[in-house]
Image (cartoon, coloured by chain):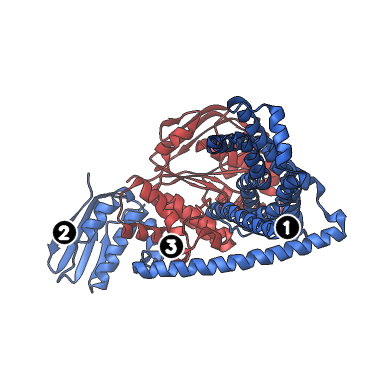
Amino acid sequence: MAQSIEQTRDGDALVLRPRGRWVVAEAQALDDRLGEIRAGAARRVRIDLAGVEAMDTTGAWLLFRLKRGLEAGGAAVSVDHVGAELAPLLTQIEKRQTSPVKPPRRGFGPIVLLAHIGFRTVELLRLTRALLAFFGEVAITFARTATRPRRLRFTPMVAQMQRAGVSALGIVGLLSFLVGIVMTYIGAQQLKPYGAEIFTVNLLAVGFLRELGGLMAAIIIAGRSGSAFTAEIGAMIVNEEVDAMRTLGLDPIEVLVVPRILGLILTLPFLTFWADFTGLAGGAVICRLSLDIPLTTFLAQLHSAVSLWSVFLGIIKAPFFAVCIALIGCNEGLLVTRSAESVGRRTTQSVVQAIFLVIVLDALFSIFFNELGI
Amino acid sequence: MSSASDVAARVVRVRGLATRIGGRILVRDVTFDLHSGEVLGVVGASGSGKSVLLRTIVGLVSAAAGTIEIFGDELSRHGRADLRRFGTRWGVLFQDGALFSSLTVAENIMVPLREQLRLSQALMHEIAALKIALVGLPPDTADKFPAMLSGGMRKRAGLARALALDPKLLFLDEPTAGLDPIAATEFDGLVRDLKESLGLTVFMVTHDLDSLIAICDRIAVIVDQHVIIGTLAELVGNPHPWIQAYFRGPRGRAAQIAEAANG
């Protein structure tokens, strides 16, 4: 039977006879009905529960709210025929003071937008300061580790190198190989009208060795390992592992951050070299297959186009990229607060910031090298 | 409504259940019925598989053997797909509350309301406020995020969410652990009142002897991979050394138990 409320007058008293199931599943219908009830002139209200088939806490709350509302209107309210098993429930509900909860207020659009911009700006500045402070802290820890090399956690560092480096060989190699293919095709297309296809090799060699190899490796590692650093350290924060470390007298920077940064510094140059190699290999394959440039010619042209110095210039940037990626990854990880959403947000930030900084740094290097005339 | 005593409706029926985690069998041959309005307390040494038993019965972990029927419906061996069906009919409180960390307490409580029912925003907020008050949290907890709460408060908020849909069956994993004694006593009182008014059936993993004495009708003890079920008086008389140590140990408040068992 559906829930209903029968209203009758008995002299100066209003008699309410709720019927049916007063349970949460019917709450909306009940709430709508209850809104229509007015005590009017009645000074006394009697609520007769005899017809109620079932009642749960939500139903009891609605009843209590009705009673309170009528009482606030100046009527004396009595509740009759409370079943033996309903009594404790009603007492529980009446005992608890609930205060009405206001749904959150929504502000005026443009002001909210303005406040949001301001908030983000302040947050960005704060973040920059935090990152610099973190950098300083890490530098001090590094110095301390350098004077006492035994404090260096060697095993975790090697484990990080394995995970960030060796395991990434496949994806870095494959993507560089493909980019090498693309660059060779595009270069050959542009140079063909001038009969200068052979210079495709120069384009590829300079492009990959000076810029692309390092950038490819750094961006892949930022997405792959930077995010892993943030998520790992973040999950440890959520699990209170970092706090536990501190109380055990361990420095999280020494235990978690230094091995990751050092590991990446030692790994990324090799990955850069690997990206250079596979990128050139991709180019060599296309030169052989579609441009009829045999491998020996390719190598001879390569030799004349670039020197070992170019390879070195590409690789020298890698440790700086590595510091950027690992520093941001660890910093964002340590900024995680104890919620799942925060881990996700920080991980996203970590990747975006790391890629951004890697590209900015690369641009700075280009300007610097250009000014030096190399 | 009929009182709990004459409705012998079987809410949970477990037959020959074996639980397993990581290939290791924790308990075997678990057979029991849980009747409407009954509170069953589960005790056992740490690592004996109390929580895994609870997780198996609610279908989060698949059983190694045996059958589980809830409200007369069989939970299939690989129960994940079934959980949706049961979600409205039971409430589960996890050890640390398991609140959704990106939602406020009020929003956490509104999750099941929003998923299962069509209610107005204002009514949902009212119900959330009611549940928060019911579990004894201050009203301003509503807008707080779980990370801002203490362990005990998170637990109560978790209970508030478990109670959101006023389920007939409640699974509690160590509900009073981490609460101060006064809050724990209030909690026992709340469960008892809800049980009496709503005919609530409770499956409760606990270490709290006071809870066992105050609200549990029967107690299940996990020893040597088996479950021994009985009333408090029966178990106190059980010669098994672990059970004796548990109920009669320095924390066992032997006198109090004897009194409860006789009275």
What amino acid is found at the position of numbered circle 1 in the picture? Pro
Residue B20 point in image, percent of width and height: 61, 32
Q: Position of residue B212 (x, y in %)?
A: 57, 49
Q: Residue shown at 49%/68% (left/top)?
A: A119
Q: Secondary structure at mark 2?
A: strand
**What is the crowding at mark 3: few (fewer than 14 residues within 10 Å), some, or many (at least 20)?**
many
For label 2, count other residues whose C-alpha is less than 10 Å away and answer few (under 14), some (14-19) or many (20+): few
User: Relative to residue A289, is residue A327 depicted above or below?
Assistant: below
A160 with respect to A79 (left or right):
right
Look at the numbered discs 1 and 3 and tell me whether their residues touch, using CB distance below 8 Å: no
Q: Which color is chain A depicted in?
A: blue
Q: Position of residue A354 (x, y in %)?
A: 61, 54
Which one is nearer the viewer's eye here, B131 or A200? Answer: A200
Q: Nearer the viewer, residue A370 or A365?
A: A370
Pinpoint residue B167: horizontal percent, then vertical percent: 40, 46
The residue that label 3 is drawn on is B133
Residue position for label 1: A252
Q: Tell me the distance, in whole angstroms, between the alpha carbons under discs 1 and 3.
A: 40 Å
> Mark 2 highlights which residue?
A7
Picture quadrant where residue A361 is located: bottom right
Give the quadrant of residue A371: bottom right
Q: Are marks 2 and 1 in contact (CB under 8 Å)?
A: no
Which residue is more in the foreground, B143 or B182? B143
Extreme front residue here?
A194
- The residues tagged by marks 3 and 2 sit, at their Cα atoms, a distance apart of 31 Å
Using the rendered image of the protein, determine whether residue A147 is visible from the camera's viewpoint. Answer: yes
Question: Which residue sits at x=50%, y=66%?
Answer: A120
- Please report whichever mark, 2 or 1, sits nearer to the chain's N-terminal start: 2
Q: Is residue B166 visible?
A: no
**Chain coloured red: which letter?**
B
